[in-house]
Amino acid sequence: MERHHLGLAVAILAFTLPASGFSAVIGTNEPAPSVTIERLSVLPMKDRAAWADYIKRSDTQMKLDRETLAKELQPGEAPPPPPVAGSGKMPLNKDAAWYGSAEARAIADTIVSFQTPAGGWSKNQDRTKPPRLRGQRYANNAETMELGTGSFDAPHDRFWTFVGTLDNGATTTEMRFLARVQQQLPGKDGDVYRASIVKGVNYLLTAQYPNGGWPQNYPIEGGFHDGITFNDNAVAEAAMLLEDVAEGKAEYAFIAKDLRQKAGTASARAIRPILDAQVVVDGKKTVWPQQVDALTLAPISARNYEMRSLASAESTDILLFLMRQPNPSPEIQASVHAGVAWLKAHAIYDKAFTEVSKDEGRKLIDKPGAGPTWSRNYDIKTGKPIFGDWDKSIQDDVNNISKGRRNGYSWYGAAPQKAIEAYTKWAAAHPAKN
């Protein structure tokens, strides 16, 4: 698929903060398209059959997942309350021996119980809670979400959403935790965890799009959830876990050779859509959006306040993934050099996004010596910071968006510095070509 180019006649403008009194609403966010049979006409004829098969398999899996849960209850029996949202509490940085403890095994048992029939997991659940009850839903309570408001985040079914997702580190974190636990249980006591990991690997293989990307949720649910999702490092985390499987890392050494080979193939395929989704402006590679249309690789929106943009944090994760590749092709090298150069050019100094008072919360203020920091989102054509609000407005000054949205999102951050620091060593081994 050809790389998506935007604004070929528009130069990237130098970044300047909006002058006081001149900030403005500069646009309105638009909803993201779904992956549907009807939209396959945007693809070359040769690619349509694979996508049609993917959509059919997804629909079949969604039906199976629902039926499997329904069969856990007797006719007329009321289901238990759904799980309550919370932090996952699945630490991946404990001493190895801890993962063989009763505490770790209890978490692992809860993880296994919430694995969906498809093989993935939902998000934002406290895994220190008891295992899933018979008939209890896999995902959190969403009944309280108000429908009919035009919210891009509203699910098609409040009783069935995020049933299998890569959002917020879900699925890959569960798999990595189980991998550490099974290492401490080489006998039959660890078999249940190893089986769950294998099921998770197959889930990632099945959920991968024909072009190598991953949706946020699988089975696919529509809207921005169908986009290839760089947000929360979803694509890179899936690809890196499969890389670890393919390389036979110690915690995955039990996985059969043929499945490891499939994992390696899938991980390698993920690089193609990443390279093709790097936005090109005025003939120059820049960085990446938070998510792209799975079919066209064009940047798309997500929630009401997450507009199509160039995204600094997500681009950081992508660059770190590309720099991890052992034998980067000239195309990968060019992608990394361009991406890091863009981040360096858009670093902000002498400003801080910080709390100014309990009443006003966080604002962007002058702070000599501060930085570097980066805006979370940049306009694709101009390269200037942009910000969204619940009303779908796109604004050019973070201080003018609503207080709740200003304080409830990471509009500025220093994450790109990680990529820049890693690049120093990487570039020494892979110097830029003039």
Image (cartoon, rainbow, N blue to C red):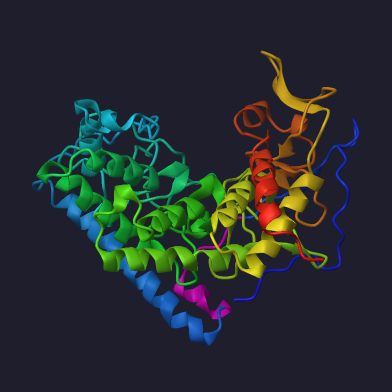
Which quadrant of the rendered structure holds the N terminus? bottom right
Q: Could you say where residue 145 lies in the image, as x and y percent from the top left?
A: 44, 38
Q: Is residue 359 visible?
A: yes
Q: Could you say where residue 407 lies in the image, as x and y percent from the top left?
A: 64, 27
The reply, left or right, for residue 366 in relation to residue 130 is: right
The residue sitting at 18% across, 40% down in the picture is 185
Name the outermost residue toward the top: 358
The residue sitting at 37% across, 76% down in the picture is 53
Residue 3, magenta (yes or no): no
State whether residue 297 is above or below residue 133.
Answer: below
Residue 33, magenta (yes or no): yes
Q: Could you say where residue 269 lies in the image, as x and y percent from the top left?
A: 48, 68
Name the outermost residue toward the bottom: 45
Snapshot quadrant of residue 180: top left
State whether residue 289 is above or below residue 167.
Answer: below
The residue sitting at 37% across, 32% down in the picture is 91
Observer-nearest of 281 and 164: 281
Q: Could you say where residue 57 lies in the image, as x and y percent from the top left?
A: 32, 70
Q: Is residue 76 visible?
A: no
Q: Which residues are magenta?
A: 31-42
Name the outermost residue toward the front: 429
The reply, left or right, for residue 352 in relation to residue 415 is: right
Q: How many marks?
A: 0
The reply, left or right, for residue 230 in relation to residue 134 is: right
Which quadrant of the rendered structure holds the C terminus? bottom right
